[in-house]
Every structure is written in structure tokens, then in C-alpha cells.
Image (spheres, helix red, strand yellow):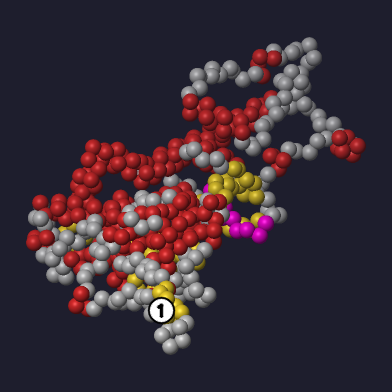
Amino acid sequence: MYENYFQFKEKPFSLTPDPKFLYLSKQYQGALDHMLYGIKQREGFMVIAGDVGTGKTTLCRCLLDRLEEDVEVALILNPMLSDMDLLRNIVHDLQIEPVQLRQPAGIIEDGSTGDNIEIELTPETPSPIDWKPRDHTWTNNASKKELIDALNVFLLNRHEQGRTTVLIVDEAQNLSLDVMEQIRILSNIETEKDKLLQIIFVGQLELNEKLKLPTLKQLNQRISIRYEISPLDMDGTKNYIEHRILVAGAASRVTFTKSAVKEIFNYSKGYPRLINLVCDRALLAAYNQHAETIDRPHIGEAIRSLLGEENKSYFLSHFIKTQLPLVASILFFIAGLSFFILSKKDVGEIASLPNEIFAQQSAPVQSAPQSVKEPVASVKPAPVEKAAATPVQEFIEDLDSTSNVPEAIVPEPEAPVVETPQITEEEKATIAPPSADVMKAGNYRIQVYSLRDKAEAEQYRQELAKGGFDVFLKKAVSAGQDWYIVYVGPFSDINSAKVNLKALKFSGREPILLSVSTTS
């Protein structure tokens, strides 16, 4: 429909496995090179695995175009077969003739001596004039032994002629265990130096797991070449789209913007089949709008048409996955900053209040006649009514109760201390030293993540930085292995550290508050 408008010679994003549209990225070129090498070197078994929609069938078609003329190929596209059906398909694809049974030996009498002479009668070879098209219907009634014998003779003849025979099984993960065992037996057809049949399994990732079954141990040990195809990355997706447009029509005037390519990659995750579907619908949307540049709105419309009624849930999940973490981090940062400012203000007021009370009540009392006694209530400050605590104040009070600010000791007003007695050395030894919390004066930092993968640690570091935290990454070595630690901080005082600690806990993380001494 849109081919003439965009000046395409054919549809650029068709789902058919056309080998001329194959984009030879590093992954596909590597898979193709491994198969060609295995066939040339007669390696026997090869396995090419990839996820759904990575272009494995197209890769097989491209391999067939790259093979030389001296290579015979049997291609099995439907692996849901019995072992007999598999043998019949192989014999039929290779156009193998049935084995001609040798006629019984005849006996003639020598006229001069009278001795009996045994001779072997061979069938007459038809002349080229009497040649008729080969009839392969004999495979339908042949037994397993007849099929294997015919295949054995065929492989030996082709090997003597310097030719190679290849069996390619697509969607090999669907092969039954009996059929896979039958294929293993076929691989036993070999000479002292060469494998006569090269077998390539092409299948999904679960093929690798299936080959690990104990019943397929012998087959798994014979696989000499393994290769796994991965989806395309962002650059590969861009090059893939440009390659198919170029092949479909060099004079095409259509272009995809960077934002459109990014949206295609976010939806397809680099799988060629999904890329083809989205691009085809996007071209149709641009054609309806008479546009020559494919932009992000066209991709959104294409995705909605593909998902149908599910498009709402897709775009909601896409927003939650991409935007919600950033919004949540910003909100947590604002909340943490507010708690920090309020805690700094109230902690200073609360800490100064006991010192003022202590200074007033511990001041020396002027000498007065013993008969005159000041009432105790005169030295007590006026009572202050305490308002009901709000949730924010409760949070600050909890923060203050866990902080390391030493509490001031308020003496009883009835017994003010006027004179400080002298303390002996023996008495000093019995006095307990100050608590470790009071003596801490070093830096503080919060450990948030401890990971083996540096890239994953860097991703978490960037996520925390976007959330407004002061974050840094440090490498550590433990038991000969590298670890990457993500820290928040450092902080010069414990109150700042605890505010950030609680903000991290509210975000669903499990942070650890650490104290770094100056000696370490």
C-alpha cells in the first residue's frame, strides 16, 4: 500500500525469511562464520541457539545461499516428526535412490573343461534416451533398515566424489528424544578421518537445556560448535532499519528520527521480528498522514495498533518502569531534606534548653539567714504546656532520641552543688569511660549496595544521584574477588547521616550506617 509513496521496490519489513534482507551484525556474522567453518572442516554436530524472533530461520536461508555447489543439503523445517518420517524427509531431500540388490550369481559350464564357473549378474544400465524423472515414492514403503542403508551408500559415494552432505534442523528444540537419538545414530556414519554427515541444530534457547538431559548425554558430548544469537542493541537496531530500507529501495525518501528509533528499541528490545512489525505499522501510519519522516508519534500509533486493547496497560507499565523511579527519588529527596532542616533547627533549640536550666539552677546561692528559706517553687521555671505532637514532630523526636548528641544532666534544685570534692586516683579508676557514641568524631557514610557487577553498581549509583543523594562508588577486594560498594555520603555529623538513612529506608532500600574512624 505504501510502497509507491515511499518509492520502495518491495516491502522493507516483511516477516518472510528473505536472506537478502539479513543484516549481518556482529552476532549474525559470527553465527554464519561458525556454521561455514564447521561444514568445511567436517566438525559433525553444531548448535545455533537464539531467542524467539532473533532471525534464526533467515540465517539458515542465508547459509544455503553461501554454500558451494559441492554441498548437498537436507533442510528440516518441521521437526514435529517421528524417527521414520525424519529419515524419509532426509532421503527425499537428498534425492537418494534405493539400493539395488545384487542379483544371485549364475553358474555356467566351461565347454572345454566341463568345470562350473560362477558369474554375477548385474542389471542393465538404462541409456540416456530411456531416462525418466526419479521416483522417490519408494521411501513411503521402505523399512528403516532400507532407508539407513540407502543413506549410508549415498554418503559414501558423495565422500568419494569430494562432496559434503549437510542436515539442517530448524526449531530443533521441538525434536522428540527418540528423533534426537536417531540423529545421533546417523552421525555414526563416518570414515576413519571424516564425518560423512554434518548436522546443524538451529533452535531456541531451551534447546541448550534440553541437550543437558541425561538421556542425551552422548549427543551433547558430540557437539563441537555452539553459538548463541543475542538481540540487537540500540545502534544495531538503527543500522538494521537503515539496512532494510536501503535493500527495499535505494531511492526511498523515508527517514526515522532518533526518538523514533529509541521508541522502537524500547518496545522491541532489539528483536528483529518485533522491529519489523513496528516499522511496518509506522510506515502505514506515516502514509496515512502523508509524512515522509517517521517520528515518535507514528511509533506510538504503531504500537497501539499492535497491542490492541492491551495498549493502555503497556503504556502504563512503560511509564511506571521508566519515569516512576525518578519521580519517587525526587519526592524522597524533598522529604529527607525537609526532615533534615527541621531536625537541625529543633535539635539546636532542644540542646540549648537543658544547658540554660542547668546554668540557672547550679548557680551559687547567696548567703542568707538559716531561718529564712526561699520557697522551692521560686527557683523552678514556669511550667510550659506541651502541645500535641504532629507526625513530623514525632519523626524529629525519634531522630533526636537516636542521635549522638550527649544529653545534659539536670541536677535536683533542692540540692544544688556548691563545691566540687576532690577525687582520688583510685576513685578515677572506678569511673566508667564515656560511651562510644559520645566519643565518635569521625566521618559517617551509608552503604546502600554491595555488588559483583561494576555496570550494575554504576547504574544504581546514577539512580541514587538522580534522586538527589550524594553518592560515590568504591571498589573492594574480598577473598580474591572484586566487589563494588555504593555509598551515600560522607557526612560530618551523625544527624545528617541519619536523616539520609531514614530517607533511604522509606524508598524501600536496606541501607547500613557506617562510621569511619580517622585511623582507618
For the residue marked with disc 1, what is the amino acid? Ile
Q: Is residue 435 above or below residue 13?
A: above
Give the answer, above or below, for where 431 lies relative to 294. Answer: above
- Specify start and end residues of the magenta stretch as a single range: 479-488
Q: Which residue is mark 1?
A: 108
**Residue drawn 71% across the image and 20% down it:** 413
> What x and y, as percent, mark residue 220?
52, 59
Q: Nearer the viewer, residue 248 or 390?
A: 248
185 displayed left or right of 4: right
Q: Nearer the viewer, residue 209 or 109?
A: 109
| On-image quarter of the N terminus | bottom left
- Residue 424 falls in image quadrant: top right
Q: Residue furthest top?
A: 371
Q: Is residue 177 visible in the rendered structure shown here?
A: yes
Q: Secondary structure at mark 1?
A: strand
Is 186 contained in the magenta span?
no
Q: Is 312 on the left-hand or right-hand side of 434?
A: left
The vertical placement of 192 against 480, above or below, is below
Q: Quadrant of residue 412?
A: top right
